[in-house]
Image: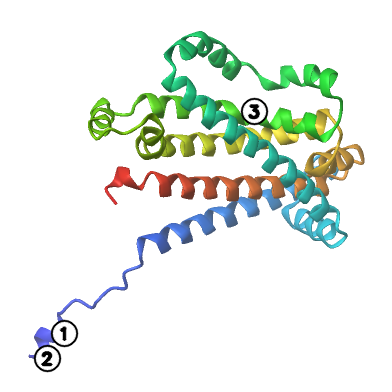
Amino acid sequence: MSAVQAHEPKPRMIVPQSLQGGLVSLAGLAAGAGIWELIGRHTQASSFAPFSETVKALWSITKSGELPRALESSLQLFGAGLGFALVIGFVVGLLLARIRLLRVGLEPYILMLYATPMFALIPFILSLFGFEFRAKVIVVTLFGVWPILINTLEGARSVSADLLEVARSYRSTEAKLWRHVIVPYTLPYTMTGVRQAIARSLVGMLASEYLLAATGLGNLILTYTNRFDTARVLAAVLVITVLATILMAIGRAIENYFARWKAGV
């Protein structure tokens, strides 16, 4: 009996898949920070700063209040621009999907504007609205509205004709048709557009802070670039990177929530 027991395989520890993924991600981040530190130690200080110096600079501008003020200003601009983009993109996308004549007339312009680099329109916006906050909101909105509009349009157009026919057979009015069929069916597509718009709106936020009135995180980067303070520049860039990652994760979670019907949940 003891011989049989001696040859029995010992149970192995099973690491959950999510934990394994988290450990791999942390290892990758640690390796990246190490490479950053190594390159920074062997590069001219005015060109690149080590990771450790960047973290010290990040703590310094956070403690002084510069970073919180800049972050608050940028988030206000980002939130306002993305909010307007969501409302405009969702409403216009639904209208274009339901009114064929309007869609045929405007779709070429929408596709052209979506393909147009929004940076090219900033001088035009500047000449019309000046350097005020509303001008920057318009820039962020223009960056973010197109993926929301196009995804909403495609989602509303892809509503099954059978669903619409069944709803009409129950004598649903046009308002009920929108509320109970079209809008719920379109929301997952809209949320996909919102996730894409988050990244574009962040670019628009920085572009407006660079090229219009210098405020927020864009102003921090410009100020410390002019001072050749690379550590603080990289600290601001690091904050933007982390902010973008968090916002994209939130966007993905919202998208998954509204698209849960696709997985049969």
Q: Report, in whole angstroms, how far the alpha carbon at label 2 lies from the one at label 1.
A: 6 Å
Residue located beneath label 3 in the image = 143
Q: Report, in whole angstroms, how far the alpha carbon at label 3 lies from the one at label 2.
A: 72 Å
Tell me if 9 is positioned left or right of 199 in this view: left
Residue located beneath label 1 in the image = 6
Q: Mark 2 falls on what kind of element?
A: helix
Chain-order first, disc 3 or disc 1:
1
Binning the other alpha carbons within 10 Å of mark 1 as few (below 14), some (14 to 19) or many (20 upward) gives few
User: Is the Cβ of the residue at disc 3 closer than 8 Å to that at disc 1?
Assistant: no
Q: Closest to the observer: 51 or 72?
A: 72
Q: Amino acid at mark 2?
A: Ser
Query: Measuring 53% from the left and 59% from the top, which residue is drawn there?
Result: 26
Question: In the current view of this chain or complex, which residue is farthest to the bottom?
Answer: 2
Label total for image: 3
Residue located beneath label 2 in the image = 2
Chain-order first, disc 3 or disc 2:
2
Query: Measuring 53% from the left and 12% from the top, which residue is drawn there?
Result: 106
Q: Amino acid at mark 3?
A: Phe
Image quarter for residue 165? top left
User: Is the Cβ of the residue at disc 3 closer than 8 Å to that at disc 2?
Assistant: no
Q: Is residue 14 above or below residue 35?
A: below
Tell me if 47 is positioned left or right of 172 in this view: right
User: Is the Cβ of the residue at disc 2 closer than 8 Å to that at disc 1?
Assistant: yes
Image quarter for residue 163? top left
Residue 248 in the image, given as x and y percentages of width and height: 55, 45
Q: Closest to the observer: 104 or 197?
A: 104
Tell me if 114 is positioned left or right of 258 in this view: right
- The quadrant of the picture occupied by the N terminus is bottom left
Residue 98 in the image, given as x and y percentages of width and height: 42, 21
